[in-house]
Image (cartoon, helix red, strand yellow):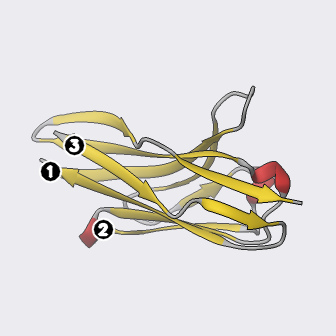
Amino acid sequence: QVQLVESGGGLVQAGGSLRLSCVASGSISSVNAMAWYRQAPGKRRELVAVISSGGTTDYADSVKGRFTISRDNAKNTVYLQMNSLKPEDTAVYYCNAHIKVVVTLNDYWGQGTQVTVSS
């Protein structure tokens, strides 16, 4: 069984910062790409940032220059540093990871963490 557990969400004023963390645990053989998605009320879930196992990153245009994704492969952990937060960043943020268990590669999701940015 594999679990992703997020932490670090909360309420912050516009212009502030938050750091999200997501730890993968369980019967893991290897962790490939890891990513953060978000879903605002009434909107579709969208990709925020992704990082490969080798450290290559990509970002949604709306967060480029403000958010930084990173990972610690030894700890099976991915981070999202969010700076210069805007009210439109308010959403539930979900961690996603492509994880190999023995020989099977599956897609896993965390439970989500709420980020609220007040104006």
Check contact, mark 1 vs mark 2: CB within 8 A. Answer: no
Badge 3 density bin: few <14, some 14–19, many ≥20, Cα 10 Å: some
Which residue type does callout 3 highlight? Val
Q: Do residues under tags 1 and 3 come within 8 Å of each other at their CB atoms?
A: no
Q: Position of residue 79 (x, y in %)?
A: 48, 66
Q: Nearer the viewer, mark 1 or mark 3?
A: 3
Local secondary structure at mark 1: loop
Residue at 12%, 37% in the rendered image: 103
Vertical side of 66 occupied by 98: above or below: above
Rendered image quadrant of residue 82: bottom right
* Residue for point 38% across, 46% down: 97
Secondary structure state at the residue bearing disc 2: helix
Foreground label between 3 and 2: 3
- Cα–Cα span, label 1 and label 2: 12 Å
* Residue 107 as seen in the image, left or right of residue 104: right
The residue pinned by badge 3 equals 2
Residue 2, image x, y percentages = 22, 43
